[in-house]
Image (cartoon, rainbow, N blue to C red):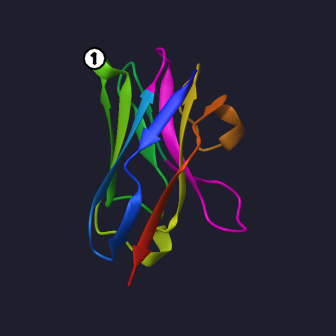
Amino acid sequence: VQLQASGGGLVQAGDSLRLSCAASEPTVSMGWFRRKTGSEPEFVAGVNWQGGSEGYGDNVKGRFAISLDNAKNTVYLQMNSLKTEDTAVYYCVASNSGWSILPHSFNSWGRGTQVTVSS
């Protein structure tokens, strides 16, 4: 599965940003991880195409929202009330099984898009 993410950029704390990721073919689940410099990938959000089950990392709950567009095979990540600690490279992921907080559960990873939040 090829994943094409877009929407990263430089914003100020408190701003909003929306990431998009288009998949080249249908999958069972999609999601987002992020990686800060020198750190392991951190689960951000995941969603199943069937049933809509979704989950969020503790650091983004209540501020981020994941959604799907079936017609476009696209997943979105709406990020609100951004904080400087949200600065990271965000990776779109896809799997042929249900979403998980474990990085190795997702067999397809996009190239990553940089999100920088300034104070």
Residue drawn at 71 percent across, 37 percent down: 104
Which residue of the protein is positioned furthest toward the bottom in this rendering?
A: 119
Residue drawn at 40 percent across, 22 percent down: 49
Q: Is residue 26 magenta?
A: yes
The percent coordinates of residue 60 (x first, y second) are 42, 60
Residue drawn at 36 percent across, 28 percent down: 74
Q: Is residue 108 magenta?
A: no
Q: Which residues are magenta?
A: 23-44
The percent coordinates of residue 27 (x first, y second) are 50, 18
Foreground of the two, 115 or 70? 115
**How dense is the environment of label 1, judged by Cα within 10 Å: few (below 14), some, or many (20 and up)?**
few
Left/right placement of residue 96 relative to residue 31 reads right
Left/right placement of residue 11 relative to residue 114 reads left
- For the N terminus, give its image quadrant: top right
Foreground of the two, 104 or 69? 69
Question: Circle 1 sits in a helix, a strand or a loop, which is it?
Answer: helix
**Up-down: is 115 above or below 95?**
below
Determine which quarter of the picture holds residue 35.
bottom right
Residue linked to disc 1: 71
The percent coordinates of residue 53 (x first, y second) are 40, 31
The percent coordinates of residue 6 (x first, y second) are 41, 44
Q: Amino acid at mark 1?
A: Ala
Residue drawn at 56 percent across, 47 percent down: 112
**Up-down: is 50 above or below 35?**
above
Foreground of the two, 10 or 84? 10
Q: How many marks?
A: 1
- For the C terminus, give its image quadrant: bottom left
